Image (cartoon, rainbow, N blue to C red):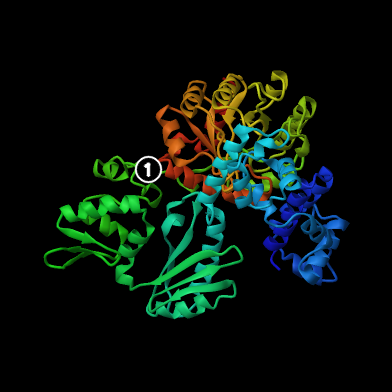
Amino acid sequence: MENREIARMLWETADLMEIAGEDGFRIRSYRNAASAIEGYPEAISAILKDPGKKVTDIPGIGKGIASALEEIEQRGSFDRRDQMLEVYPPTALELLKIQGLGPKGIRTLFEHYRVSTIDGLEKICQEHKLQELPRMGAKLEEKVLRSIAAYRQRAGRFLLSFAYGVADELVAFLKAIPGVETVTPAGSLRRGKETVGDLDLLATGPNAEAALEPFTKHPKVHEVLAKGANKASVKFGLEGLQVDLRTLPKESYGAALQYFTGSKEHSIPLRARAQKMGMTLSEYSLSRVDTKEIVARETEEQIYAALGLPWIPPELRENQGEIEAAEAGKLPKLVELGDIRGDVHMHTTETDGRATLEEMAEAARERGYEYIAITDHSKALAMANGLDEKRAVAFAHQVREMDQKGLGIRVFSGLECDIRRDGTMDLEDSALGELDFVIGSVHSYMNLEAAEMTDRLLRALECPHLRALGHPTGRILLNRDPYPFDFDAVAAAAARRNVYLEINASPERLDLTASLVRAAKAHGAKFVISTDAHHPKHLANMRYGVLMARRGWLEAGDILNTLPLTQFAQAIKPK
């Protein structure tokens, strides 16, 4: 069994335990173990089979979890999970994705109505029975119904990082097949959409068709949906991501890549442009209507050039003004991953991180960064062992002492400080003033009305020590919608007060969205791209944050952490 599947079992067990109202410490132990296993480089199954190794050597794995892992290896489940499934069916876990209920609400719902499915919850709400339960009312009922509708709309979607993982695996697999030269992901993955519904792969080579049969026979393929002479569609992995593989001649590669990258909204006006020029654009070529002469097909650059346009980066292809900008010669020079010089939002074992300060610094140095900021949680996140004023100041001194040792990378002391419900910061000004880089984030009271949330954020922006607003909309992809607030007012205030808006590169967040990035830039706001890393491997997620910035039309000059060290240090000095 793969690490990801083992981690999923532990996550689900922890969720069921939370619904049951069990001890928080035990719940955290399962979640900590799941997080450790999910990111562990070696297969847990292999460690369990090796008499010379112990899973308890992995941080976060105690004897109790080790026993559960042994059971999973032997029979595919473990006692605690089985016990929870006797009380609550697996469908109850879906209810955690519906905003407004929470574990206690789900337990109450189950105890009163034995409801454990989305359909059952919807029926209860439509019959106005939810508001009959303790601490639940008509407003919650309306919110739950809206959340159910949103949940169904995103059902069948997958995180960008997950789709990239599948793509990387399949590209390597297919390129190893004789006769295949190139395999390229297209579709929404290539455009960098936050979530994808399916995965398109294009293969070329002298015998690319030879890839179709082994593709359908891949050990992770659970269902073959279709197979023809030059295309096959499958359901891949336990998650059931649909993957379409198309094989094509090398000379049609550019036309096919442009066509299958999309988006539909981008392609429609592009085809209309071709028609006005007496041409037709298809997945095979750009051709003249009257003579059938092929004008371009080998590369995307040729396609766009023949249409009188410079090549348009895939991230911009959403019919949001990119064609007009290309025609006017005003396409932005988009930020690239190589422009990023540091990561300024990360956590260590001082709070809820999985690595020490030194380990995070070393991992960042190995990535070629010039600087980082260590930004552990503040005291409001008690479950994360957040820092109070005394600990925050002491840790800042520790960071500076380590920085003076000459590690080959500059380390700034920082904090991810909670923004309280009233907009004040979680730590006193005297402590925040001791830090180099303060991020303000909302982690609680996310159900406020839009006006109250707006006032809360505006007040937070008045803090003289605040340098960045973390994951500004609070969304968790496929799980939690953004909280409501007047984004334009907050972005404009951030610009006035020189507070950077974070583009959080964590694949579960990818917050801000492309449209909000563009809106904020129009208000004069500046940005920082950071990973919110809790483990050294999370630093690699910077690629996703850069994708979001590119989708938001950002250039390197719009982003704080593209600055060289000296300029960065100057930029974050107190206001």
Name the residue at 57% across, 21% down. Answer: 455
Left or right position of 18 against 369 = right
Location of the N terminus (image quadrant): bottom right
Residue 76 locus on image (x, y percent) = 76, 68
Q: Label 1, on which residue?
A: 333
Furthest-left residue in view? 290
In front of the other: 178 or 485:
485
Rendered position, 480 above or below 493: below
Residue 561 locus on image (x, y percent) = 53, 37
In front of the other: 102 or 203:
102
Instruction: Give the SS element for disc 1.
Output: loop
Residue 484 locus on image (x, y percent) = 54, 31
Name the residue at 53% across, 50% down. Answer: 152
Name the residue at 65% across, 48% down. Answer: 95
Left or right position of 80 against 454 = right
Residue 356 locus on image (x, y percent) = 75, 44
In terms of image quadrants, where is residue 9? bottom right
Q: Amino acid at mark 1?
A: Lys
